Amino acid sequence: MDAPETSIYPKDDVQLGFKNTLICHVTGFYPPSVSISWTKNNVNVTEDMSLSQYRPMNDGTFNIFSTLKFTPGEGDIYSCTVNHRALQSQPQTKTWDVDVALPGVGPAVFCGVGLTLGLLGVATGTFFLVKGNNCN
């Protein structure tokens, strides 16, 4: 018997209020019999979830995907719990929390400084070009 390894991740970039899909990827287990359940904020979720077929791997183990369609809200916590007999009645749970990265000011500041330095360079070059032509 081989115990499963579980990972959980979103299908697309997360944006608050926009539909997305969470993927629970369970891999490396044998025999091919697992149960997968989802929770949102510690409440069982049964709607909008699906389960793929078992897929055999070259090493004789199996993997499977479970998906959950969801609309992320700030502070939500989702969990995928996997039960397999190799886990000896100790289910494996992976959690994922809604963490939306706010756009940083770094790129905008970098662009503004670059543009300012570029314009300053053009102005300085034009000044010396005009000054040089006046000397001749």
Image (cartoon, grey):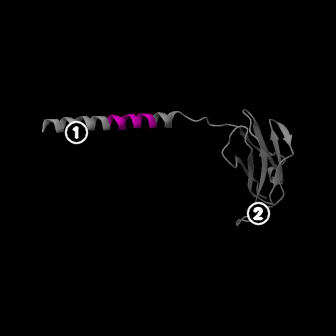
Q: Quadrant of residue 122?
A: top left
The amino acid beneath tag 1 is Leu
The residue lying toward the viewer, choosing from 26 and 123, is 123
Identify the secondary structure beneath mark 1. Answer: helix
Return the residue at label 1. Answer: 129
**x, y percent for residue 125:** 27, 38
Distance of mark 2 from mark 1, alpha carbons?
A: 71 Å
- The residue sitting at the left extreme is 136
Which residues fall within the magenta stretch?
Answer: 111-121
Residue at 79% from the left image edge and 48% from the top image edge: 68
Residue at 68% from the left image edge and 42% from the top image edge: 14
Q: Is residue 34 left or right of residue 119?
A: right
Residue at 62% from the left image edge and 37% from the top image edge: 101
Q: Is residue 27 above or below residue 124?
A: below
- Most frequent secondary structure within the magenta stretch: helix
The residue lying toward the viewer, choosing from 60 and 70, is 70
Q: Of callouts 2 and 1, which one flags the residue occurring earlier in the amino acid sequence?
A: 2
Return the residue at label 2. Answer: 55
